[in-house]
Amino acid sequence: MDPRPLHKRIVFCDFDGTITVEETFSGMLEAFSTQDYHSAARQVGSGSMTLKEGVRRLVESIPSDRYPEVIDYIRGKQIRAGFAELLDYLYFHGIPFVIISGGLLDSVTTRLQDYTGRIHAIHAPTVSTDGPNLKLHSRWEGETETVAKAAVMAEYRCEHAVAIGDGITDLNMAMAADMVFARDYLAEYMKSKGRQYLGWKDFFDVINHLSKRWLAT
Ligand SMILES: [Mg+2]
């Protein structure tokens, strides 16, 4: 028998550009990497380097003694409206809220430290700082991604998975979900594939949709 608890519903959510208004991970890499960020971004964009390789190259170029500043970078970054209210709504209804991020776990937990009581889990890569430079570790490394988000989702048992995201690294998470809230690139992608999704601007839109859908069931 599968020992994992079976949840009726779980909400899986991206962090950068979804919970935060801006892209804090790429912003941090641009600020602290000693490699050429723009050249790496171009190579990833053109497909000559995978996202996984690009992220590792940039993260592991950062000297370990700058790690406290790396973490400080996230402080005060704007959270999208309605986030606290969505966490309250889900907590009240007993629905786990799970964050899956390709950014650094320490950054995500630092920014969300005021909300941890209402967050079921945060999955993201970690770094070690015992060498001269940071070293990146990810339990869910995929062929091209630092975090294969669908692989994280597969660790949970649930009848109905909701995904909330915005970017290219959310595609597989969206494909594995039963209901998708998409904005920006992810919305364009879903549209181009003829896949159903719900557009959203802030987390109040998500609460509105969920309460309408789920009151009926
Ligand atoms: Mg994102």
Image (tube, helix red, strand yellow):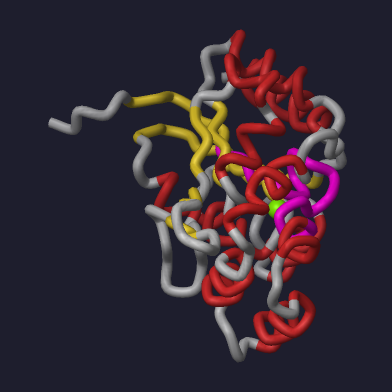
Give yes or no for residue 8 being in the magenta stretch: no
Write down the region rendered in magenta: 12-27
Q: Is residue 158 left or right of residue 60?
A: left
Q: Is residue 101 above or below residue 168?
A: above
Q: Is residue 200 above or below residue 46?
A: above
Give yes or no for residue 16 being in the magenta stretch: yes
For the N terminus, give its image quadrant: top left
- In the picture as drawn, the residue positioned furthest to the left comes out as 1
**Horizontal and vertical percent for residue 167?**
70, 59
Locate residue 211: give its quadrant. top right
Q: Is residue 48 above or below residue 26?
A: below
**Horizontal and vertical percent for residue 67?**
63, 49
**Residue drawn at 66 percent across, 65 percent down:** 168
Closer to the camera, 174 or 47?
47
**Residue drawn at 48 percent across, 34 percent down:** 160
**Horizontal and vertical percent for residue 13?**
62, 40
**Residue drawn at 78 percent across, 41 percent down:** 20
